[in-house]
Amino acid sequence: MSKPPTGRRGPYAKTAQRRQEILRTAIEVFAEYGYHGSSLREIAARVGMSETGLTHHFGGKAALLAAVIQERDEEDQVRWNSIGSLHNLIAQNTRRPGIVALFTLLSAEATAPAHPAHEFFTGRYDSVRQDLMEWVGSGQRDGTIRTDLDPALVAQILVALMDGLQVQWLYDRDADMATAFDLLMRTWLAP
């Protein structure tokens, strides 16, 4: 009797690859058509599978949306650690309006405790605020950020600023998110 193969091969590797393919395709479709204009049928067709097969991997449209947002957030997470990195995140978001619109819509819908993405967004906002509080505290210790500011309030304001700027930009693509962000940041920097 031969030994079973080791490593990520066989059906498990194919399943992981298939999930990644579905995620990449869902990002494209959601960015192209938005949340309400897209369908699982369209995503399934683009990856060459049935809608039932697609729901086997993600359970439904809301769960797939949550996975897309989590994928996007994992890419961005490392960027919540400096003024420069937040500025770069804003610049990156101006190049992906579909994802920004999707994130904005899903984060609002997920405020309902029964929403499938509720726990994800609750955890995301807690984690982002914690990262920002640590960054502000570090900046206060090294003298780059004013020491009279409460790191928890600064973190809360930064999250509101980032999300609010995105909403305004979705309504008016001439709104300059980066300049508005930079203006506020200058008020917090140590003299």
Image (tube, rainbow, N blue to C red):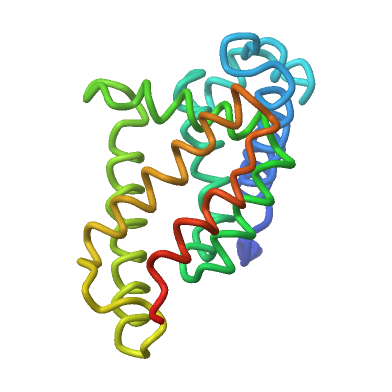
Residue occupying the point 25% across, 67% down? 151
Residue occupying the point 47% across, 66% down? 186
User: Image check: 7 left or right of 181?
Assistant: right
Q: Number of marks in the image?
A: 0
Give the image location of residue 144, x and y in percent: 41, 83
Furthest-bottom residue in view?
Answer: 142
Q: Quadrant of residue 95?
A: top right
User: Image check: 9 left or right of 136?
Assistant: right
Residue occupying the point 65% across, 63% down? 5
Residue occupying the point 22% across, 25% down? 113
* 145 up-or-down from 142: above or below: above
- Closest to the observer: 45 or 110? 110
* 119 up-or-down from 113: above or below: below
Q: Quadrant of residue 44?
A: top right
Which quadrant of the rendered structure holds the N terminus? Answer: bottom right
- Closest to the observer: 65 or 188? 188
User: Image check: 25 left or right of 115?
Assistant: right
- Closest to the observer: 5 or 175? 175
* 144 up-or-down from 87: above or below: below
Which quadrant of the rendered structure holds the C terminus? Answer: bottom left
Q: Quadrant of residue 34?
A: top right
Give the image location of residue 37, x and y in percent: 64, 9
* 115 up-or-down from 22: above or below: above
Give the image location of residue 178, x and y in percent: 61, 51
User: Image check: 171 left or right of 135?
Assistant: right
